[in-house]
């Protein structure tokens, strides 16, 4: 198989007392952008460490295009941006890129040009390249780190919290660079807490918790999820309007679907922007005093929130649709 | 061995102002003393190779390990043994070169004061000092692969003191066998090369001790580096 294959990966720490990875199996296709998300201590960084050959799994196997992760041929084709970026602070930016260019075994004839292009590519000016790294800001360090990871057009690119500490302009630039890298056929593995970025860039995302892959999401396929609209209403809205039956009826008329409600808000599934506009018109016309309407957070955010909640959310109490003292009750919103 | 690693390590060492000041002091002070005594101190003043090795080699592996530089370094096609050899040769060759230049300058001072025995003696002295730096650099590498930061130098000093105390105790208790063992350990941890070229006069023993220091130091470092997992996870 071409790409990355992980089979039954288990990794423990402290003589087996801490199980960081527990039988993880994954297949990542060549040229795929694959995200890894999960709470702190879930095993994400351990998984990346094993993929890089930095950590030895207790059991299981990893192959990158049929080769072990610590093979020199794999490392020649690997770019890596760690989360805790420790650079050789005594060098300047340009020296640093040239140093990694040499370590990567890239052509010495292109070293100087590649280093200059690397700096330019991540938006670091030529003057920044001649500054000692110890004077770099956090965002500049991150940019330089990405420049070294991109040296030589790697076949596998591992990014650990790539936009941590990067300013908004940098985030946009990183996004653009990752699109470029993807277009070149690089297999991209991103470990990040920035769910919206992961969702934007990745083809598939593994949700890791307790050392196991709990689920694999396909963000781009989540069309319905991305079109959920959360509508909030004012307390002065007449109680009789706020019943699930009424919401269902209004949604049907607008060509939408009522999902559920948690007063003073309800969630509706709409087909597109026009559908959302139609729904809002109908709600207002029906007497719902809408104070806010916004698309719900992405699929990954919902997944993350649901999976990491200590206990499932309580079911909606139908009686809560009615303001206190009105005696108006509704049916089960779900 | 990787010349990129070797040269970048030496550049890094020389970019530290404190280290640079120490190296200059160790280089210049003996020459001034020789000049002041009209070369009377002889080669005694020039036995600085181990000091150069200590200054260049302190934290040669441990500081990289504790700073987190390994993460990026070993994501590159760099073998751990290749890294170790580059570090060892950089420290040993750097210290030997500094000592050789210093010795030639010192010998010139002695020669101008008619205090130099012969240039053959100068070459022999440089050879002995060079062998000593290679042996000591291997011992430092062994400690440095096990201890973070500059714990290697601290451990060498502490073990030197501890072995000295034990040696005294073994003599006081008339335990010759213990004294012999401690002496062997001392020779391994603090290699000495005087007389190594006097082959028929026990020089081979000195050579064996130097080689054992190199073999043990590098073996410890190689095993420790090979077993080391590069982790920064919170688990």
Image (cartoon, grey):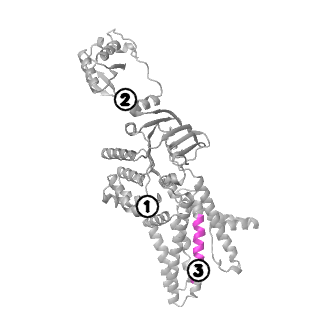
Q: Is residue B126 magenta?
A: yes
Callouts 2 and 3 close, C-beta under 8 Å = no
Residue A223, label in figure? 2
Q: Nearer the viewer, residue B186 or A22?
A: A22
Give the number of the mark in front: 2 or 3. Answer: 2
Is residue A92 visible in the rendered image? The answer is no
Helix, strand or loop under label 1: loop
Quarter of the rendering containing residue A197: top left
Q: Chain of mark 2?
A: A
Task: Give the main secondary structure, helix, strand or loop, of the magenta stretch.
Answer: helix
A237 above or below A164? above
Q: Quadrant of the C terminus of chain A?
A: top left
As drawn, the residue found furthest toward the top would be A327
Q: Residues within 10 Å of mark 2 (few under 14, many from 20)?
A: few
Look at 54% across and 79% down and name the residue there. B45
The residue labelled by disc 1 is A107
B186 above or below B224? below
Image location of residue A313, percent across then percent down: 44, 23
Q: Magenta span covers which residues?
A: B122-139
Q: CA distance from mark 1 to mark 3?
A: 42 Å
Quarter of the rendering containing residue A230: top left
The residue labelled by disc 3 is B125
Q: CA distance from mark 2 to mark 3?
A: 79 Å
Apparent side of residue B140 relative to residue A303 in the rendered image (left or right) = right
């Amino acid at each position: 198989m071409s790409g990355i294959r992980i089979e039954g990966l288990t990794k423990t720490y402290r003589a087996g007392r801490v199980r960081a990875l527990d039988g993880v199996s994954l297949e990542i296709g060549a040229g795929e952008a694959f995200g890894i998300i999960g709470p702190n201590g879930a095993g994400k960084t351990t998984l990346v460490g094993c993929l890089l050959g930095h950590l030895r799994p207790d059991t299981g196997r990893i192959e990158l295009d049929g080769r072990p992760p610590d093979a020199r041929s794999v490392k020649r084709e690997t770019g890596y941006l760690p989360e805790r970026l420790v650079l050789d602070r005594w060098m300047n930016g340009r020296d640093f890129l040239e140093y990694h260019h040499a370590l990567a075994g890239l052509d010495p004839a292109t070293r100087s040009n590649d280093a200059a292009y690397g700096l330019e590519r991540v938006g670091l000016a030529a003057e920044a390249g001649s500054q000692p790294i110890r004077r770099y800001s956090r965002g500049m360090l991150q940019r330089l780190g990405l420049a070294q990871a991109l040296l030589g057009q790697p076949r596998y690119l591992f990014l650990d919290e790539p936009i941590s500490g990067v300013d908004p302009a940098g985030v946009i630039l990183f996004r653009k660079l990752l699109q470029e890298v993807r277009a070149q056929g690089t297999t991209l593995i991103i470990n990040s807490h920035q769910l919206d970025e992961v969702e934007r860039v990745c083809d598939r995302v593994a949700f890791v918790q307790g050392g196991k892959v709990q689920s694999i999401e396909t963000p781009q396929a989540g069309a319905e999820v991305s079109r959920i609209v959360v509508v909030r209403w004012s307390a002065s809205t007449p109680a009789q309007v706020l019943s699930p039956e009424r919401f269902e009826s209004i949604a049907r008329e607008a060509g939408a679907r009522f999902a559920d409600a948690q007063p003073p808000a309800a969630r509706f599934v709409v087909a597109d922007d026009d559908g959302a506009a139609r729904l809002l018109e109908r709600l207002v016309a029906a007497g719902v005093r809408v104070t806010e309407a916004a698309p719900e957070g992405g699929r990954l955010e919902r997944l993350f929130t649901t999976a990491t909640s200590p206990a499932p959310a309580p079911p909606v109490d139908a009686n809560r649709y009615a303001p206190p003292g009105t005696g108006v009750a509704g049916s089960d919103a779900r | 061995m990787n010349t990129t690693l070797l040269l970048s390590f030496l550049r890094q060492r020389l970019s530290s102002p404190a280290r640079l000041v120490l190296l200059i002091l160790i280089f210049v002070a003996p020459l001034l003393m020789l000049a002041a005594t009209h070369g009377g101190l002889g080669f005694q003043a020039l036995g600085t190779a181990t000091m150069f090795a200590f200054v260049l080699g302190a934290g040669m592996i441990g500081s990289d390990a504790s700073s987190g530089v390994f993460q990026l370094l070993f994501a590159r096609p760099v073998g751990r043994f290749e890294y170790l050899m580059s570090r060892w040769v950089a420290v040993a060759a750097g210290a030997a070169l500094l000592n050789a230049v210093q010795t030639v300058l010192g010998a010139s001072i002695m020669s101008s004061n008619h205090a130099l025995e012969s240039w053959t003696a100068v070459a022999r002295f440089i050879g002995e000092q060079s062998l000593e730096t290679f042996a000591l650099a291997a011992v430092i590498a062994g400690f440095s692969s096990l201890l973070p930061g500059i714990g290697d130098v601290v451990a060498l000093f502490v073990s030197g003191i501890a072995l000295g105390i034990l040696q005294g105790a073994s003599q006081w208790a008339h335990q010759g066998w213990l004294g012999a063992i401690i002496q062997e350990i001392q020779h391994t941890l603090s290699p000495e090369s005087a007389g190594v070229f006097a082959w028929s006069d026990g020089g081979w023993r000195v050579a064996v001790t130097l080689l054992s220091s190199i073999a043990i130091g590098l073996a410890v470092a190689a095993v420790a580096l090979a077993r080391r997992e590069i982790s920064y996870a919170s688990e």
